[in-house]
């Protein structure tokens, strides 16, 4: 019997607004603090690294923010993204659960990251900025910002965490194809990078170090601003197009999710899927279980401390109230480079504090076991980051099989793994390990 497995929306259904969960929190978030005075930061404190229009968005308390028409026109290159039912995975697991995934890997850069890269580049161009500096872990954000800068005529420089620079050379080449300059971090391009290398010439790098380098570059280079691919409020805001579309697509499927799952590093793709559903929990008393999945080797939500901490290693960012492993934490060189961050988005952290979401962690070998199962069932090769979500999906589906419960599981497949095949090679040859 034929079965509908893909649920699509017309281009007219691309969201016209982003959703701001900060408006609906039952308890206000703690404000970011100035790194020098330890007082709440104001708009003027952030002008050295961000344009004013994005600072206003970062501090915005409106429930919805309109998406500029030119941004929606570019979104239309790949949005709305499909919602798929993973029928073959269900069969492989012999589960009564229905499994759905939102597939963000259809974007030109291969992940969800352009959802924020495009508006960030647009707002910077509107502000007269000529050049953007950023960091990237696995390279998905760097590639996305390189693409967005090319579309809006901006220069782009990327500090790519050294271990990923070496593990994922084709992501570097993708950025360069779109015209970006790419440096392995720690690099010899900045004072902080040179200091780190002087102390440890073999340093594999971290997102905290790369952020410090990008911010130093921003402050020292005229007509330059900094762009961040995760963590901050305006980045989480931009990503909510994912969940807004998914709500409509689940209605097309005629089902309501019981469990919603996403991987977390800094929190952007998880926020994009989860926040619109948290709104329904708060407004409509929905009983979704929402699960954030992270690596055992970088367990920010499951083992980190909720505290004020710096977003970077050099202590140049505002202090953020977030779950953190400490801004000097050096994560192991796992292949899910996008999840090797010491802190968690303040909005995701606040949702965790309020009990609106749960969190679990897994070791790398279990992640790739589930990724290969998914690829052999559904055909798509997932990036190592969303493979964390797949592992939690598999566990939920097995529990449903054992209990006979027919639950509906939804997750965000935020990127493809076609440029991560070296990690699959290590796994399939038995040489991967857990760090």
Image (cartoon, rainbow, N blue to C red):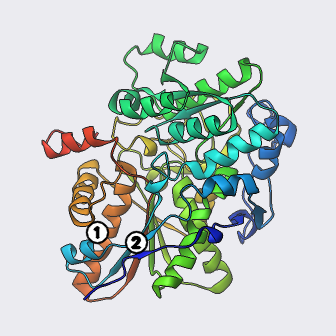
- From the top left corner, tell me how far across and down residue 219 is, in percent: 73, 22
Q: Is residue 406 above or below residue 260?
A: below
Residue found farthest to the left: 429
Question: Of residues 76 and 417, which is closer to you in this image?
Answer: 76
Instruction: Give the quadrant of the C terminus.
Output: top left
Q: Quick one: SS at disc 2? A: strand
Label placed on residue 394: 1
Label placed on residue 15: none
Task: Give the side of residue 230 with respect to residue 177, left or right.
Answer: right
- From the top left corner, tell me how far across and down residue 252 is, in percent: 50, 83
Question: Of residues 381 and 404, which is closer to you in this image?
Answer: 381
The residue that label 2 is drawn on is 84
Question: Mark 2 against mark 1, which lies toward the viewer?
Answer: 2
- From the top left corner, tell me how far across and down residue 173 is, in percent: 43, 29
Which residue is rendered at x = 50% and y = 17% of the image? 187
In contact (CB < 8 Å): disc 2 and disc 1: no
Quarter of the figure with residue 248: bottom right
Q: Can you see residue 81?
A: yes
Residue found farthest to the top: 198
Which residue is rendered at x = 42% and y = 52% of the image? 415
The residue carrying pointer 1 sits among few (fewer than 14), some (14 to 19) or many (20 or more) residues within 10 Å by Cα, namely many
Question: Of residues 14 and 99, which is closer to you in this image?
Answer: 14
Task: Give the side of residue 34 with respect to residue 307, left or right.
Answer: right
Q: Residues under labels 2 and 1: Cα distance?
A: 16 Å
Which residue is rendered at x = 47% and y = 42% of the image? 140
The residue carrying pointer 2 sits among few (fewer than 14), some (14 to 19) or many (20 or more) residues within 10 Å by Cα, namely many
Task: Give the side of residue 357 with respect to residue 390, left or right.
Answer: right
Q: Quick one: SS at disc 1? A: helix
């Amino acid at each position: 019997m034929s079965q509908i497995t893909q649920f699509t929306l017309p281009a007219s259904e691309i969201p016209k607004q982003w959703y701001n969960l900060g408006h609906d929190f039952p308890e206000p978030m703690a404000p970011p603090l100035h790194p020098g005075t330890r007082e709440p930061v104001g708009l003027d404190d952030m002008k050295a690294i961000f344009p004013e229009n994005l600072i206003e968005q970062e501090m915005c308390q409106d429930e919805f923010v309109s998406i500029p028409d030119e941004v929606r026109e570019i979104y239309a290159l790949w949005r709305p993204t499909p919602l798929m039912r993973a029928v073959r995975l269900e069969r492989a697991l012999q589960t009564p659960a229905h499994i759905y995934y939102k597939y963000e890997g259809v974007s030109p850069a291969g992940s969800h990251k352009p959802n924020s890269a495009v508006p960030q580049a647009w707002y910077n161009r509107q502000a007269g900025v000529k050049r953007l500096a950023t960091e990237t872990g696995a390279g998905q954000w760097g590639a996305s910002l390189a693409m967005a800068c090319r579309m809006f005529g901006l220069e782009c420089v990327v500090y790519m965490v050294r271990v990923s620079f070496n593990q994922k050379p084709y992501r570097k080449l993708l950025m360069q194809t779109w015209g970006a300059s790419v440096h392995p971090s720690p690099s010899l391009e900045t004072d902080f990078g040179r200091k780190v290398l002087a102390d440890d010439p073999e340093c594999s790098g971290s997102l905290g170090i790369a952020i410090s380098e990008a911010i130093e570059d921003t402050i020292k280079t005229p007509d330059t601003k900094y762009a961040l691919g995760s963590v901050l409020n305006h980045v989480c805001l931009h990503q909510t197009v994912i969940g807004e579309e998914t709500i409509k697509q689940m209605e097309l499927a005629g089902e309501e999710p019981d469990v919603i799952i996403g991987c977390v590093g800094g929190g952007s793709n998880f926020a994009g899927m989860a926040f619109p559903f948290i709104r329904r929990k708060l407004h409509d008393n929905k009983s979704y279980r929402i699960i954030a999945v992270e690596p055992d080797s970088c367990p920010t939500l499951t083992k980190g401390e909720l505290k004020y901490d710096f977003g970077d290693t050099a202590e140049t960012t505002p202090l953020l109230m977030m779950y953190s492993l400490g801004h000097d934490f050096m994560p192991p060189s796992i292949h899910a480079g996008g999840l090797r961050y010491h802190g968690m988005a303040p909005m995701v952290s606040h949702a965790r504090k309020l009990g609106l979401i749960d969190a679990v962690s897994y070791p790398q070998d279990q992640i790739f076991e589930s990724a290969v199962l998914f690829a052999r069932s559904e055909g798509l090769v997932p990036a190592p980051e969303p493979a964390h979500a797949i592992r939690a999906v598999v566990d939920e589906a097995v529990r449903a099989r054992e209990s006979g419960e027919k639950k509906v599981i939804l997750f965000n497949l935020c990127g493809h793994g076609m440029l991560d095949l070296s990690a699959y090679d290590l796994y399939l040859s038995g040489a991967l390990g857990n760090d």
